[in-house]
Amino acid sequence: MQAFKKVLWWIAALFVGVPTFLIAFESWTAVTESKKARELQAGRDSEAKVVAEKIEARIRSGNLEFDDLAASKWIYESDVDSMNSRPIRYATVQALTPIKLTRHSSASFYPTLTVRRNSDGTTDVIIRITQGQFVCRIGGCVLPVRLDNATPINFTAVEPSDFNSKTLFITPGKRLASKIEKAKLLRVETTLFQEGNHVITFLIAGLEAK
């Protein structure tokens, strides 16, 4: 009888212990993967910071040649407008350095700049963030834009029709796109909700005129 009870006890321990072990293992795996992801991101941010410092030093000296530096490049994509079967072309570049939030989160992220050539011949220049919110009035807001070492130019920015506060359309898009095609560096000053002003820097050399 005692032997039978021991067998039942071990069976019960086995069935109770295995799920507990699996839960603990999954938790440990998640923590490990999260740590590795943070370390990888920290390494990328550190490399980006070094490149950014070199670029800023060259900007101050008037040297706008960045080809030898491993920096952001334009990524090209295309789509077809279902209403007229004509192409829509996108060119997107990532910001040189990340924005680090401080108020409600410690997240860091890289904004993107997109030049969109629409099927009707118009052009949009779009800046996007993945965290936080842009501060821009319903009627639009002013965004100072500096190309290379030229004097900043004030452009108007508006939110998209769905009022997504993580996206801004810089207008007039065609005018800015034509300037981007001839420049190597773009800096735009934006305001984030409860995070203050941030100057976002993009390396824009080599944009294909399509």
Image (cartoon, grey):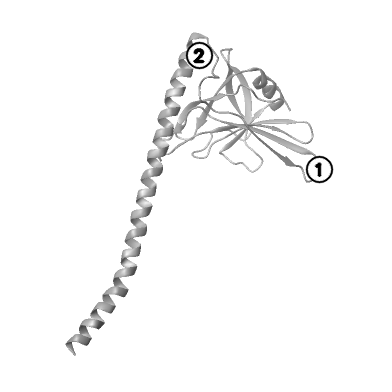
Q: CA separation, marks 1 and 2?
A: 43 Å
Please provide percent x and percent y for residue 51. 46, 23
Q: Are marks 1 and 2 in contact (CB under 8 Å)?
A: no
Residue beneath label 1, please? Answer: 85
Q: Quadrant of residue 108?
A: top left
Give the answer, above or below, for where 209 lies relative to 23. above
Residue beneath label 2, please? Answer: 59
Q: Quadrant of residue 124?
A: top right
Residue type at numbered disc 1:
Ser
Quarter occupied by the C terminus: top right
Please provide percent x and percent y for residue 198. 48, 27
Residue located at (29% from left, 70% from top): 17
Q: Residue lying furthest top in this view?
A: 61
Residue located at (58% from left, 21% from top): 145
Q: Quadrant of residue 86?
A: top right
Secondary element under disc 1, as helix, strand or loop, is loop
Give the answer, above or below, for where 60 lies relative to 82. above
Residue located at (52% from left, 9% from top): 62
